[in-house]
Amino acid sequence: MTTLNLLTMDALPVGEYVVEPHGRRFVITAILGRTPTGRTYRAQDARTGTPFYLHESLVPPGLSGVMSLANLAANTELPYVAPLLPPFGMPWFDGVVRYFVAERIPPDRMSEAETAAQSKKEWERWVEQLLVGLHELHRRGVAFGFDARTVALHIAISRSGVASWQLLGGLQLLHQAPEAEFTDVGALAAFAANTKLLEAPSHIRHTLQSAAQGMARLRAAELVERLIGNKVADSRSGTLRIELGAATSVGMREHNEDNFCAVEFPTDHCWSHPPVLIGVADGMGGVDAGEVASAVAIAQLQQRTRAHLATVKGAGDLNEWVNQVVREINAAVVEEGQRLGTPIGSTLAFALIVEGVAFYASVGDSRIYLWSAQRNNGAPMRLVRDHSLVQSMVDAGLLRDEERYHHPERNKLVRSLGDLRSGYSDEHPPLPLQPGDWLVICSDGLWEAVHDAQLAEVLAHAPNAQVACERLVDLANSNDAEDNITVVIARVY
């Protein structure tokens, strides 16, 4: 058998069509360049005109990094990372298959001249966003492995002021190139240190210069904590305001096993604005006293948050604390089940907003979304991963995301409160919020009945958080939601 090399094959010509299995047609508009294992085109959706990058290889390993990321995140878009569509192959002449991953291009990008003219404050915010995005890539097992000379090519900044990583075709698998994680951080730090951040506060300058010069081997998560954590702890002049809303319905069930909270804690000398806590717990169907488990989870969450906020001197430790408190709440749920003599279980998803930054955690399949008309082309961003059997099948490529809603085992969880072995959250980076952001937390009764496009439509036209919650619950009921329905929202303005 002859081994084909992409570099010996002609590039697809401008005007050629690439058709993915579900019928989307891309038309090539430019040939951008190639790597040792692949090639990248600029293309657009032939029907809508939406711009894309198309990353191509003749063998799947040539796109191993971006394919791995696309399989994990094509239907759960990562913050500050260009959205990807699922990988696909297209038969070509003589039995050759060309493999592709499509990457959506922000339609409203600033030019290099426009970004260079922005203020120091804008550059600080962009670097924070890029660090969060880099951490999201690394924790999913992929990295660029670039250097300071090429890092700028992979950065796109929209006119709404959001920075994101782009041109993802050359991503490497971290287990094959473990040093790429540190290379990425050093390259971004060197790039940032040569911008207006040279005028930034001393703790930002020092941290970036240490990473850029190789004096500190830092992971993206560590830089996120150092830079964003310090900014949060030192901030006293923020102007963000938060409006809360909440709604719940029994749906088609006889009893409502969901519980929720949407509370504002009194401010003290440590905070310039009252901290806000929103959360949803969904008592597990099929387990006795599910409503007890969810009630314990929410009560424990509020009590422990109030106690922690009364003692903490800054926001720097909150990201670690939200994961710790999930384990403590899980232990309390297990203890209550033992006291009752019956197993009880629940999901839990919550966010603690302190000084304009959200610290969040989840276990089970209750979801946290971020939506803004200015972010992600107006599409909701799912911030947490479902801990369910169906999500595992989607991640493994055994099931398409849209098939989850009708799968017979869609309600089976692989992680939940009530089990000492599995009652813990994934780690998530702190999320800086901005005016126009809506943070939405809901039980599966809502997201199974109200899909992302409908969620965005409701939020785009709702006058406030409470009305949005009520409309979403009404819509879920009209869509024949089979489960209890609960949603809480924090709207930032």
Image (spheres, rainbow, N blue to C red):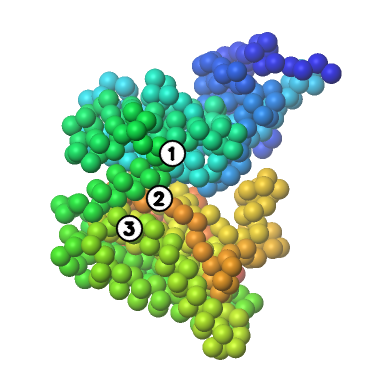
Tell me the amino acid under the disc marked 1.
Answer: Leu
- Label 3 environment density (alpha carbons within 10 Å; few <14, some 14–19, many ≥20): few
- Looking at the image, the residue that sits furthest to the bottom is 340
- Of the two numbered discs 2 and 3 on the same chain, state the one appearing first in sequence: 3
Q: Is residue 41 above or below residue 375?
A: above
Towards the viewer: 65 or 49: 65
Q: Which residue is mark 1?
A: 134
Residue that appears at 36% across and 73% down = 304
Q: Which residue is mark 2?
A: 429
- Of the two numbered discs 1 and 3 on the same chain, state the one appearing first in sequence: 1
Marks 1 and 3, Cα distance to the nearest angstrom? 21 Å
Q: What percent of the width, then of the height, locates residue 462?
A: 35, 57
SS for callout 1 = helix
- Looking at the image, the residue that sits furthest to the front is 215
Tell me the amino acid under the disc marked 2.
Answer: Pro
Q: Is residue 113 above or below residue 141?
A: above
Q: Which residue is mark 3?
A: 317
Tell me the amino acid under the disc marked 3.
Answer: Asp
- Label 1 environment density (alpha carbons within 10 Å; few <14, some 14–19, many ≥20): many
Towards the viewer: 123 or 365: 123
Numbered circles on residues, count: 3
SS for callout 3 = loop
Q: What percent of the width, then of the height, locates residue 409?
A: 69, 63
